[in-house]
Amino acid sequence: MNAPWAARQPPPCHPGLRGWWLLAGVFIGFLFLLGMQLKLQWFAFLFLGSLILIASQVAADKKTYFLVLFVLALPVWIGKHLDFHPSPYGISTFGFPIHVSLLPLTALYVIWAARQVAGDAPAPLSTRGLLPLAGVFAAAAISVLGATDQRFAAYDLFALGTSILIFSYAASEIRQRRELQLVLGLLIFSAAFQGVIALAQHLAGSTLGLDFFGADKKLYGYVGLDAVSRVGGLVGHPNNLALFFDLMLPLSLSLLFCPVSGRTRFFLAVAVFLQLVGLSVTFSRGGIIGSGLAVLCLAVFHGSRRFGLIRAFFMTMAGALLLAAFLTIVPNPFVKGLTRTERTVHGRLLLTEIALTLIQHHPLFGVGLNNYTHASRQYDFTREQIVSAWNSPVHNLLLFIAGEIGLMGLICFGVFLVRALTALIPAMRSPDPFILSVGGGLFFGLLAFLIHAQVDYSIWTQNRPLWFCLGLAMCMWRLGRPATATASPEVH
């Protein structure tokens, strides 16, 4: 049952007439935005937002409509920075980030609030993990007060707040099995689509003119004297795209172990293949290793239920050795990615040493959000002056968090991650094959991300797919426990 405001029906109107009114509204709004003489990016952002709101008027189920748009928009960077300020230092946030996914997310929260007020199926927000997450936000807020540049720190604190809203909605409002299936289907489709874009960018040797939609400038790596073109799809940097595949590849693969219809199995198989292709052409060593280890663990996890743990382990290792032998014989982008020769490993080690020195000087609440690169320069005593040369923070998620918001914030974040991962245990023990597959896929996807993030730079405050998957993990705590009673039928 819907809230009263959503239950009221408009007066009878001829379908064609309603369509003309919508077209007229779009045309008038288009002329209005043209008259304001906005910059192209602001014009496109506002016009896209207007189309989303106008189209919602013909959607029968508005929550599903906005949920679909929200999930599809998660991995794509289309947005603007309010109060934009450039910086000579390597930072992640140049203003208050307004991403296009915040538009449907705001609508979803409005629908939720309206239903709470109306008393229509009240559903309080999930509280699991909120206490350590509140500790993370509190440590981040305190770090802003001590930051050298409080303006940029406040920008990133706002970004962290929006990510927490994404987490809270995923943890609280995905309550039904059909909603979970819808969300998973959209996420896997998005990952497959990113794989197609990445492959096309690699073959074309360019961003395909998709810079506005989040495509980053073309990057190069080197294998000996040969240059390889690295691509980032619509996510941005190649390493960020690889982090997205780290989350999605184990989840997509895990669902293949679930009894599904032939059509669904074909879709999942194609999606897994496209994600593997997309991951390979990022040439991200951390992504290939992280996803590879997660897939091996996933194979042991599912194999142990049929063959036993010991047999599943040795079977998986045998398959991995055969695959490794095949990949070393046949030229492929996976081997090229693992054998890149830019000597970035040495630079990462130097950044790690600098990070440890910085944390020793700012142990409690760090140097402030979005201030790491600026502050770390005074602790860079390396001959290469690596911080100035790379203009980048440390390529280790845990050290980066400790440097920005201190050890107090890192401890809270660590507790929060443990709460999210342990929330998946009931699902991973479920007799329901669908719930078990989702729980295992999310667990090993998050594991792959965390492995990769220890050797690459990750913008943790506004990595929307990561926060959404953490929310799904909390959601599985609720969906996984009732599923222990009975197994469900085939998923279509």
Image: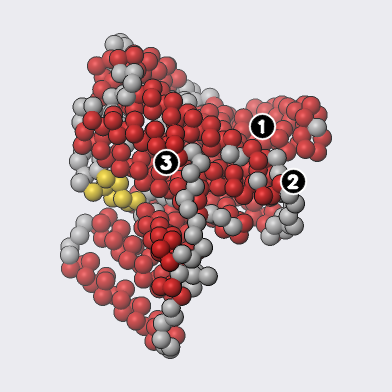
Counting residues from the N terminus, which is met first, the one under dot 1 or under dot 3? 1
Q: Number of labelled discs?
A: 3
**In the rendered image, which residue does mark 2 sit on?**
431
Q: Which residue is farthest left?
A: 36
- Quadrant in the rendering for residue 279: top right
Image marks 1 and 3: residues in contact by CB distance under 8 Å: no
Disc 3 element: loop
Q: Amino acid at mark 2?
A: Pro
Seen at 38% across and 24% down, the residue is 408
Which label belongs to residue 297? 1
Q: Residues within 10 Å of mark 3 (few under 14, many from 20)?
A: some
Disc 2 element: loop
Q: Amino acid at mark 1?
A: Cys
Query: Is residue 83 at all visible to an observer of this figure?
Result: yes
Say whether residue 8 is left or right of residue 370: right
Seen at 53% across and 51% down, the residue is 187
Between 58 and 322, the residue placed more toward the observer is: 58
Q: Residues within 10 Å of mark 1 (few under 14, many from 20)?
A: some
Q: Residues within 10 Å of mark 2 (few under 14, many from 20)?
A: some
**In the rendered image, which residue does mark 3 sit on?**
463
Report x, y in % for residue 288.
Answer: 56, 32
Report x, y in % for residue 217.
Answer: 36, 41
* 260 up-or-down from 392: above or below: below
Between 404 and 387, the residue placed more toward the observer is: 404
Disc 1 element: helix
Between 111 and 125, the residue placed more toward the observer is: 125
Say whether residue 412 is left or right of residue 189: left
